């Protein structure tokens, strides 16, 4: 099952077609047994024409988020640990990331309020005061208010590596700013938890030139998804649930930085592709 948030409402795509749901997003997704509920909705809601659905998804799609906060986990893959250690060497903070990778407690940080999140084919930003910027492709969990993982989407955790590398305490500035997060293209709600064999891939293009391409399986993640969700909910309540980005295992080489106009396409099997163009805020 896939939920798309569009200009005409919420579209539910299943093997029985596409249905229009006249419901509030937060109320719809924040429930136990979301998959079973959506199965029932396919029996009672009107069908949407296939061409209409394709047009809406192409041109009138929003990020699959309502009032939910977006949080993120870091250093969950070995490649991410190595990259963070390298960028923080000059500031004397490289050892922090090695210790986080092997520690019992994961790194979890606040990423974005919903108004700073963009959707598929919308523009993400790089900071004006950063000189080294990368996208971070991440499986993103939707966790309901009971702490249960109910769905998945694709996340682009935009990161200012020059700022974070200067001092690990600058992490909030490196991670949280206008249009620093993208989610989409849909909320994927499967009957069973997503497979560890699932592949995440990324392609970055500058004009017609492919600047970076990579892929990785979820099985390479050191942490369990349920473990990350449990730590987030230890001392926090989320009345409408929340989103949790789960870290990246794909990091471009140190001589790469994003430019305005670059196109970032992140794909996850079963969910689809999240595509964003890179921009920069005007002064």
Image: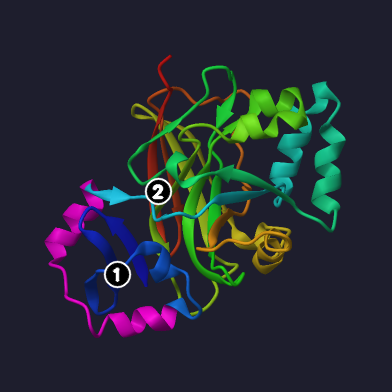
Q: Give the magenta range.
A: 35-59
Q: Which quadrant holds residue 222?
A: bottom right
The location of residue 268, given as percent across then percent down, is 47, 57
Nearest the camera: 230 or 220?
Answer: 230
Q: Which residue is mark 1?
A: 12
Give SS at disc 1: strand
- In which image quadrant can residue 66 be found? bottom left
The C terminus: image quadrant = top left
Q: Secondary structure at mark 2?
A: strand
Earlier residue among tags 2 and 1: 1
Residue at 68% across / 63% down in the picture?
Answer: 233
Which residue is located at x 50 percent, y 49 percent? Answer: 155
Residue at 81% across, 56% down: 105
Front residue of this view, candidates 269 and 44: 44
| Disc 1: CA contacts within 10 A as few (<14), some (14-19) or many (>=20) | many
Query: Does residue 225 appear left or right of residue 194 in this picture?
Result: right
Residue 28: image location, x then y, percent: 39, 70
- Figure check: 116 above or below 35: above
The picture places residue 102, in percent across and down from the top left corner, at: 84, 53
Numbered mark located on residue 274 in the image: 2
Q: Nearer the viewer, residue 132 or 283?
A: 283
Residue 151 highlighted magenta (yes or no): no
- Tell me residue 58's x, y (percent): 23, 49
Q: Which residue corresponds to the image point at 85% horizontal and 54% vertical from the top-left? A: 103
Please say whether residue 215 is visible from this viewpoint: no
Q: Is residue 47 left or right of residue 61?
A: left
Please name which of the two marks, 2 or 1, marks the residue nearer to the observer: 1
Q: Locate residue 159 relative to residue 260 in the image: left or right.
A: right
> In the image, is 27 to the left or to the right of 251?
left
Q: Is residue 54 magenta?
A: yes
């Amino acid at each position: 099952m896939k939920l798309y948030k569009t200009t005409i409402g919420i579209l539910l795509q299943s093997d029985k077609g596409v249905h229009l749901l006249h419901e509030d997003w937060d109320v719809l997704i924040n429930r136990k047994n979301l998959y079973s509920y959506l199965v029932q909705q396919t029996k009672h809601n009107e069908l949407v024409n296939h061409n209409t659905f394709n047009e809406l998804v192409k041109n009138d799609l929003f990020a699959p988020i309502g009032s939910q906060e977006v949080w993120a986990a870091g250093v969950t893959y070995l490649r991410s640990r190595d990259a963070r250690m390298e960028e923080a060497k000059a500031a004397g903070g490289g050892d922090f990331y090695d210790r986080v990778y092997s520690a019992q407690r994961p790194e979890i940080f606040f990423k974005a309020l919903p108004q700073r999140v963009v959707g598929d084919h919308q523009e993400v930003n790089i900071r004006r005061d950063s000189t080294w910027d990368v996208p971070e492709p991440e499986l993103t969990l939707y966790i309901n208010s009971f702490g249960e993982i109910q769905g998945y989407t694709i996340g682009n955790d935009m990161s200012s590596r020059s700022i974070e590398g200067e001092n690990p305490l600058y992490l909030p500035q490196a991670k949280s700013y206008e249009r620093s997060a993208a989610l989409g293209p849909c909320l994927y709600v499967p009957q069973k938890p997503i497979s560890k064999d699932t592949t995440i891939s990324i392609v970055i293009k500058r004009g017609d030139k492919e600047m970076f391409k990579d892929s990785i399986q979820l099985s390479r993640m050191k942490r369990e998804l349920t473990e990350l969700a449990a730590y987030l909910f230890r001392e926090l309540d989320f009345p409408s649930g929340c989103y949790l980005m789960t870290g990246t295992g794909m990091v471009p080489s140190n001589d790469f930085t994003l430019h305005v106009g670059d196109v970032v396409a992140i794909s996850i099997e079963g969910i689809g592709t999240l595509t964003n163009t890179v921009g920069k805020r005007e002064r």
